[in-house]
Structures are given as C-alpha cells and as structure tokens.
Image (tube, helix red, strand yellow):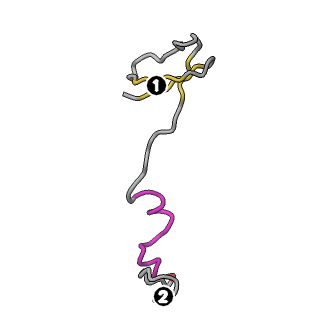
Amino acid sequence: MPLYVYRCDTCGHEVERLQRFSDPPLTTCERCGGSFEKVLFPPGLQFKGTGWYVTDYARKGSASDRSAETGDSGSGSGADGK
C-alpha cells in the first residue's frame, strides 16, 4: 500500500496515511476542518550497477581502451609515475 501525505490548505497540518489505491482520499483536516490536498514527492529510486547512462552512453569503449588512448597505464602510482 502506498503512503500518502496530505497537507491542509488552511492551517498547514500534514498527515501521512497508508491507503489502498481504491480508498477515497482524505478531504477535511481533523484539526481545523479545512480542505486537504495530496503532497507529491519524487519516487525513491536509486539506479545502481551497469546499464545506466554513465556506464553505457557517456563513454564509448572499455576502460582499457580509454587508458590506451590517454597513455595511462592504470597503475595508480601517483603524479611522479614511480
């Protein structure tokens, strides 16, 4: 069941409710009797792993291909190359 947040237009009181999609929305504030409106939040998504923009489209080729183009050996030995 999704969690909905409602905010009163009159007093600003916020209420969180777990409701089914088929449940009617809350309409009146229990504190002042004002009207509620649903508060919209962005979904809580987190993209991990391969297959997303940074790994697939931003840079073409594998890491070894890119290091050969730039002359980097990939050893991570520091700025002096030792």
Q: Residue 16 shows which numbered tag?
A: 1
At x 51%, y 64%, the residue is 58
At x 40%, y 54%, the residue is 48
Q: State the residue in front, 19 or 10.
A: 10
Amino acid type, residue under disc 2 in the picture: Gly
At x 44%, y 72%, the residue is 61
Q: Residues within 10 Å of mark 2 (few under 14, many from 20)?
A: few
Amino acid type, residue under disc 1 in the picture: Glu
In the shown orientation, is residue 55 left or right of residue 9?
left
Can you tell which quarter of the image residue 11 is in? top right
Q: Position of residue 40 (x, y in %)?
A: 53, 31
Residue occupying the far left of the picture: 1
Which residue lies under the disc numbered 2?
Answer: 81
Of callouts 2 and 1, which one flags the residue occurring earlier in the amino acid sequence? 1
Q: State the residue in front, 6 or 23.
A: 6
Q: Give the magenta-colored segment's residue range.
A: 51-67
